[in-house]
Image (tube, rainbow, N blue to C red):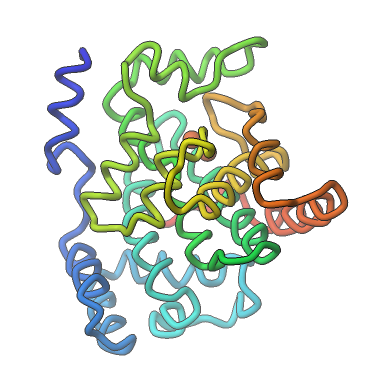
Amino acid sequence: MDLDALSKKLENRESFPALPSILSDVIHEIDAENISMEDLSRLIQKDLSFSAQLVRQANSGLYAEAGRVSTVLQAVRLLGFRMLKGLCLTLPIFSRYRNVQGIPELWYHSRAASVCAGIVAGRVHNVEKDEAETVALLHDLGKVFLILEMRSFMNDQIQMADEPDRDSDWKCETGTLGINHCFIGARYGRMFNFPGSIIDPILWHHEPNKATHNKEMTHVCCLGDQIATIVGASHPDFPFVEPSILTSLDYLGIRQDRFLLILTDCLESVSRISPLDWPE
Ligand SMILES: [Fe+2]
Ligand SMILES: [Fe+2]
């Protein structure tokens, strides 16, 4: 597929994996900001599969309430509307394509990056923790599109992942396809009316210095992404840490001693996520 064909595909919402219709309704209600948690939970319960995934997510060991969440309403209260919308866009898609090469590793990486970004957000000013967690959960969603649509290219990338002196994933994508997963993820975010505070970090998470708005959140997302790699939850197609981590540490004023504390927290929290913990 050439760049023109790929660009045309990206113009069309149908090109992206379709969401179950009830989840489209859930996203619509969250965007309208006029629904109670109780009513939203009743709507979610019409999708039995997603309801079970949501309760499982709330019990995944990442929250203090883990093991005690038994209803959709409890899960919604725990996760909040923003994270709920992020999960509407990720859980069904990752679950549906769980047998495709690269998808399980990407799901593990996305959840780990979410946890790490939340920990970083807790240690800097002006960044909301749950928004940082949502941003990082979504940051590589564009890669799902590439894995599904450009399978031979992505399979080659995964095969070559460990080769030394290799360009970063996003640079290889730009070099070969003329487009990269950051751009595609931001397009997806725009289709679902996410605010700039979520779209900008998705677009610039590998080049945080280029963000002109939402800079703090972009650097927090960059750190969450890179720290997930450091603690062992890397991308299937690029397992190395990028120099942008130094840029983001510097921008956020995180010195060595604070970074070591953050790393320790991230390592401990990510160890509670199972790489094999799939949404059923
Ligand atoms: Fe990325
Ligand atoms: Fe990533």
Q: Residue at x 15, y 61 (%)?
A: 21
Left/right placement of residue 43 relative to residue 178 reads left
Whether residue 23 is situated above or below residue 267 in the rendered picture:
below
- 71, above or below 31, in the image: below
204 vs 21, left or right, is right
- Quarter of the N terminus within the rendering: top left
Q: Residue at x 15, y 19 (%)?
A: 5
User: Does residue 9 appear left or right of residue 89 in this picture?
Assistant: left
Q: Identify the residue at horizontal 55%, vertical 54% (top origin).
A: 216
Q: Which residue reaches farthest front?
A: 212
Image coordinates for residue 8, horizontal then vertical, percent:
13, 27
- Which residue is the extreme one toward the right? 257
Q: Is residue 35 above or below residue 155?
A: below
Q: Is residue 216 above or below residue 36?
A: above
In which quarter of the view is residue 246 placed? Answer: top right
Residue 54, percent from left and from top: 42, 68
Residue 95, position as x, y percentages in the image: 37, 49
- In this view of the protein, can residue 105 be seen by the observer? no
Left or right, 34 with reference to 167:
left
How many numbered marks have been drawn onto this rendered protein structure? 0
Which image quarter is the C terminus in? Answer: bottom left
* Residue drawn at the location 52% of the way across and 60% of the way down: 133
Location of residue 183 in the rendering, given as x and y in whole percent from the top left corner: 34, 34
Q: Is residue 118 visible in the rendered structure shown here?
A: yes
| Quadrant in the rendering for residue 245 | top right
